[in-house]
Image (cartoon, helix red, strand yellow):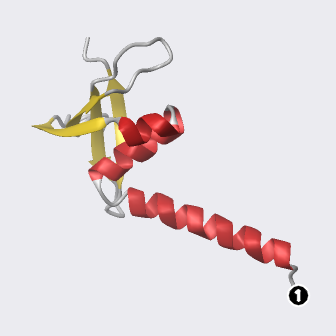
């Protein structure tokens, strides 16, 4: 079965996007920037400053928290400054954001 040029370009584009998402999830900072780009604004994802909190909060009953990071320069739709982001690693070793909030 022969595929057209448009189909091949579309599949290559999808593969590139998936590889970019995986590459960004390899580091905590990349996972945070990806989360902000998806849930916020792309310029905010580039503009924010990220600091490692060095705090690990893990509950025996829940995986809701993890490694804490501080983010400067990111606001939600209610114009509340979102300071804290928690990350965990999944079974593949990729980082993912588990929680984000104001801390208040």
Is 41 placed left or right of 23 in the picture?
right
Residue on which the image places disc 1: 2
Q: In this view of the protein, which residue sits in the foreground, 91 or 30? A: 30
Which quadrant: the N terminus?
Answer: bottom right
Image spot of residue 93 (x, y percent): 31, 62
Is 14 placed left or right of 67 in the picture?
right
Q: From what the image shows, is residue 70 above or below residue 82?
A: below
- Taking the spot 81% from the left edge, 73% from the top edge, the residue there is 7
Q: Residue furthest bottom?
A: 1
Image spot of residue 96 (x, y percent): 37, 47
Is any atom of residue 62 visible in this view?
no
Q: From what the image shows, is residue 91 above or below residue 104?
A: below
Is 28 placed left or right of 23 in the picture?
left
Number of on-image labels: 1
Is any atom of residue 75 visible in this view?
yes
Q: Residue furthest left?
A: 54
- Taking the spot 37% from the left edge, 49% from the top edge, the residue there is 31
Q: In this view of the protein, which residue sits in the foreground, 57 or 103? A: 103
- Taking the spot 40% from the left edge, 21% from the top edge, the residue there is 75
Image spot of residue 62 (x, y percent): 29, 35
Which quadrant: the C terminus?
Answer: top left
Q: From what the image shows, is residue 44 above or below residue 94?
A: above
Name the image quarter holding residue 83: top left
Q: From what the image shows, is residue 48 above or below residue 92?
A: above
- Taking the spot 20% from the left edge, 34% from the top edge, the residue there is 59
Q: How packed is label 1: few (under 14 Cα within 10 Å), some, or many (20 or more)?
A: few
Image spot of residue 85 (x, y percent): 29, 33
User: Quick one: SS at disc 1?
Assistant: loop
């Amino acid at each position: 079965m022969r595929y057209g040029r448009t189909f091949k370009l579309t599949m290559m584009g999808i593969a590139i996007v998936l590889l970019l998402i995986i590459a960004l999830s390899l580091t905590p900072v990349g996972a945070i920037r990806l989360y902000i780009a998806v849930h916020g604004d792309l310029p905010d994802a580039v503009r924010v400053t990220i600091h490692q909190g060095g705090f690990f909060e893990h509950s025996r009953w829940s995986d809701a928290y993890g490694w804490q990071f501080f983010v400067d320069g990111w606001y939600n739709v209610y114009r509340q400054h979102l300071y804290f982001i928690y990350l965990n690693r999944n079974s593949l070793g990729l980082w993912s954001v588990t929680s984000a909030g104001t801390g208040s």
